[in-house]
Image: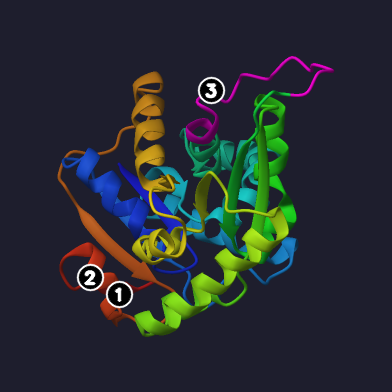
Amino acid sequence: MAIGVFDSGVGGLTVHHRLVERFPAADFIYLADQANAPYGGRSGEEIVELTKAGCVRLFAEGCDVVVLACNTAASVALRRLQQTWLPAYRRELGRPVNILGIVVPTIEAATGLPWEHEAQWREEKAEKVDVLGVFATPATARSRVYEIEIDKRRQDVAVFSEPCPELARMIEAGAPREELAAVIDRHVQALKTRIGRHPDRAILGCTHYEIVADLFQAALPAGTPLIRQPEATADALARYLERHPEFRPGERGVRRFLTTGRPGEQNSLVETFWGTPLRFEPA
């Protein structure tokens, strides 16, 4: 079988690249829903339906596990699909399948705590508060998933999300780096103004942003730690596969790349971080 990786576009390739490095023998199928990208400005119902359609396609291609390498899909659609759709779909397929996301591993990395942990509420305030900035799509920011879930676990971490409406679209289109740098700097300054200072740490809460992580690093004060979703997701998937041997990742090293959009070579930004040109086949 295989591991599926789903995103609205090319941003999820940042996660996919790290998964391939971690599991070199495994078979991977990547699906980019570029015909409907980006997801960040869509309604919740649209995001759920588009994410479900992507998972159906990857399961049909033989994937046992699908990783939603898209913060918007993971924030808005994952829990609903797991609870209301996937149980019946498993029975229909007649085999075990599952959908995982990147938000849970990111929150575990941000808090240093397992997902199952919930803090005991205390009346007294923490002596020192760690300010965590989250740069995200509007849909992820609206979901408040990082604020809600981190607050359940760490009362000494204050989370502030900064929605970046056009950034994923610009990265997907291969915008010049100087234009991307200007937009990123504007959002960093906007977050600083809202908080009253720069954050102590930051989450790049859209996998597209990982492609230009160096521009975020340049816009933030020197040495600001960035929580990297690809590494956190690879660690989480390794633990998951150890606990669930029924999911077989394959052993032929297959690499397929599908898109609902225009097939062929992807933009130069993708080539820069991937290290070689990537050609997508039509989905």
In the rendering, which numbered label is found on residue 269? Answer: 1
Q: Main secondary structure of the magenta part?
A: loop
User: Circle 3: is it few (<14), some (14-19), or many (20+) Cα within 10 Å?
Assistant: some
Q: Position of residue 138 (x, y in %)?
A: 67, 65
**Position of residue 237 in the picture relative to residue 255 (left or right):** right
Residue kind at label 3, given as amino acid type:
Leu
Question: Can residue 48 be seen in the rendering of this structure?
Answer: no
Query: Dot 3: what SS?
Result: loop
**Position of residue 147 in the picture relative to residue 106 (left or right):** right
**Position of residue 247 in the picture relative to residue 42 (left or right):** left
- Is there a contact, CB below 8 Å, between mark 2 and mark 3? no
Task: Kindly report the distance in space between the C-alpha atoms of the residues bearing marks 2 and 3.
Answer: 34 Å
In the rendering, which numbered label is found on residue 272? Answer: 2
Residue kind at label 1, given as amino acid type:
Leu
Q: Residue at x 26, y 61 (%)?
A: 256
Q: Is residue 207 magenta?
A: no
What span is in magenta? Answer: 108-125
**Position of residue 144 in the picture relative to residue 171 (left or right):** right
Query: Considering only vertical position in the picture, is 247 above or below 114?
Result: below
Q: Residue at x 74, y 57 (%)?
A: 142
